[in-house]
Image (cartoon, rainbow, N blue to C red):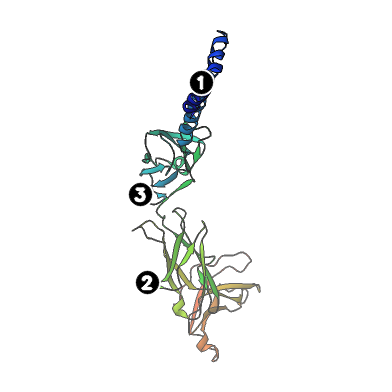
Amino acid sequence: MFFFTFLLFSYRKPRTFLAHITNASKSEPPFPVLQFSSLLAQTSQQIQNATAHCREVLSNPRLTPLHGTLEVVMYQNVSLSCHSDSGSPPIRYTLFKQRQQVSALNRTDLTPVVFNLTINSASDLGEYKCKAENEISNGEKYSRSLNFTLKEPVSKPVLSSPSSQAKKGQTVTLSCISEKGSLPITYTFFKGRQRIQPPVKMQTREAAVISVLIESSSDFGIYSCKAQNSFRNNTKYSNSFNLTLAEKFAPTTSSTGHNSTERVEESEDYVTYAEIEPIQPGEEYVNLSVIRRRDEQENRACATIYSKVLIRDGAQAGPLHSPE
């Protein structure tokens, strides 16, 4: 366009153009030369701007575990892939553990980089991020964070209760807990080999607690629990807990006139307790009557045994023996 205008101008006014060239000083270039230089500079700048605009800004990189899960075991090797789907290479990728740099890799294309790690201790767990950057200013982009958690097998659970004895009609509380093992942990309670309640899944490091109503003698016996988590083939069983019938105490009268208590045991059909008959001063023996519930209405003793005691407070009885 410029060249065509120049020719047309020269054809219509040749004298003026020649006069302009003749009268021009050596320090000032001709008008067409100035126009051409300015046009060349503008074109060069436009080419540079176009080249700069062709460099693509990075997208946020994606950080993903190649083994597909964030649960790891101790001394496990893990691989993390990081890459941006768009952006002008070369690209530099940097892996961070919290705010500390772990490793850095360069790529001349848009293929992913792979960071290889080994979980050697608890300090290798936690939050990881990946940063991508290229030569464009303000081109740093960060991925979402990944958080590794330790997958630990459960330890042997402990089954406990406030008391190992109970009465009929009483409600007993059983607690089961594993001190170690990655959460959640599922606990199952058993009476003998039979499961007694649905499994209890615990999301926190706390004991699973159930209540058992003692309705009959079949509710006494051996209880246990098991614990398991996502760690395969690692179910652990607790200690055995023996729940027995509570012992009762019956008041008796000692030889000195004070009330005393003798421990007795109760079964399903009878109770056995002891009565100490008062003795006369100077006697060395006392009579002990053993009475069962089924004989209580008849008010008769089933047996009489003797024990030699001293007639004063604080005395200890000797071994029980039958009279000759």
Separation of marks 3 and 2 at Cα, in angstroms? 39 Å
Sequence-earlier tag: 2 or 1? 1
Furthest-left residue in this view? 233
Separation of marks 2 and 1 at Cα, in angstroms? 98 Å
Q: Are marks 3 and 1 in contact (CB under 8 Å)?
A: no
Sequence-earlier tag: 3 or 1? 1
Few, some or many residues within 10 Å of mark 2 (<14, 14–19, 20+) = few
Label drawn at residue 6:
none
Above or below 19: residue 45: below
Q: Label 3's element?
A: loop
Which amino acid does the dot numbered 1 rest on?
Ser
Q: Which residue is mark 1?
A: 37
Mark in front: 3 vs 2:
3
**Is 117 displayed left or right of 27 in the figure?**
left
Q: Which residue is mark 3?
A: 67
**Residue drawn at the location 56% of the way across and 17% of the way down:** 16
Which amino acid does the dot numbered 2 rest on?
Arg
Q: Are marks 2 and 1 in contact (CB under 8 Å)?
A: no
Label drawn at residue 193:
2
**Could you say which is closer to the camera, residue 100 or residue 219?**
100
Which amino acid does the dot numbered 3 rest on?
His
Q: Position of residue 204 (x, y in %)?
A: 52, 57
Few, some or many residues within 10 Å of mark 1 (<14, 14–19, 20+) = few
Q: Label 2's element?
A: loop
